[in-house]
């Protein structure tokens, strides 16, 4: 998967967007357990899913608030020291790395600036207005919410889909920012 433009919102209900997506039909339903690594300085998505360290880098935000994401890592755990450095850089934190490989606890334990959030997701995928749409139930240890994402390689399609769903008045909230808000834990700098 290459560069993709994304618009995402978090909340319990999305008004008319919920019913509009249901009329187009669900392409697939996927459940997964994922572990996100968050930090106060991090803007990138850093997670472990299905035994793979996955990082997506926020390249830029356009004038419409759309975010352009680039995949930069998908590596089996444990990861090398070089890959662990990439994880720390994506989180915007520094730590001394002395091992040859790192599992999740080794990376998270490298600095107190990293918050580990275990998440269960139920993702429903749709095709809407030429874009991939994903309506996801997100559950952490003590909270739950939903997120709705619209993605495409073409930003104009994403904006058109967001407008058709009536969601253009709300903010675009990335997964790291949305998760930080729902866990209501202040991530230490």
Image (tube, rainbow, N blue to C red):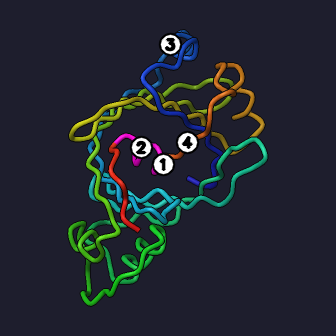
Is tag 4's residue or tag 2's residue first in the polypeptide sequence? 4
Q: Are marks 1 and 4 in contact (CB under 8 Å)?
A: yes
Residue occupied by mark 4: 173
Quadrant, the C terminus: bottom left
| Label 2 crowd bin: few (<14), some (14–19), many (20+), radius 10 Å | few
Q: Please give the range of residues in magenta.
A: 175-182
Q: Considering the numbered disc 2 on the image, is that residue within a helix, a strand or a loop? A: helix
Assess whether residue 28 is covered by the magenta stretch: no
- The reply, left or right, for residue 62 in relation to residue 134 is right
- Judge depth for marks 4 and 2 and give the one in front: 2
Residue occupied by mark 2: 181
Q: Are marks 2 and 3 in contact (CB under 8 Å)?
A: no
Q: Give the residue drawn at x 37%, y 27%.
A: 29
Q: Give the residue drawn at x 51%, y 30%.
A: 148
- Judge depth for marks 2 and 3 and give the one in front: 2
- Specify the principal SS of the magenta part: helix
Mark 1–mark 3 distance (CA, rounded to whole Å): 27 Å
114 vs 48: above or below: below
Q: Considering the numbered disc 3 on the image, is that residue within a helix, a strand or a loop? A: helix
């Amino acid at each position: 998967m290459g560069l993709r433009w994304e618009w995402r919102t978090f909340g319990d209900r999305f008004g008319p967007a919920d019913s509009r997506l249901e009329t187009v039909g669900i392409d697939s339903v996927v459940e997964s357990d994922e572990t996100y690594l968050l930090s106060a300085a991090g803007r990138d998505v850093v997670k472990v899913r299905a035994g793979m360290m996955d990082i997506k880098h926020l390249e830029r935000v356009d004038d419409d608030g759309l975010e352009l994401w680039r995949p930069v890592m998908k590596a089996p755990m444990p990861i090398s020291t070089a890959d662990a450095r990439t994880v720390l850089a994506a989180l915007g934190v520094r730590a001394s790395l002395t091992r040859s490989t790192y599992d999740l606890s080794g990376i998270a334990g490298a600095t107190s600036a990293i918050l580990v959030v275990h998440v269960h997701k139920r993702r429903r995928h749709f095709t809407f207005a030429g874009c991939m749409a994903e309506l996801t139930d997100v559950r952490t240890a003590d909270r739950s919410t939903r997120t709705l994402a619209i993605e495409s390689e073409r930003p104009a399609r994403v904006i058109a889909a967001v407008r058709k769903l009536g969601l253009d008045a709300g903010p675009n909230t990335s997964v790291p920012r949305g998760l930080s808000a729902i866990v209501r834990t202040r991530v230490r700098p």
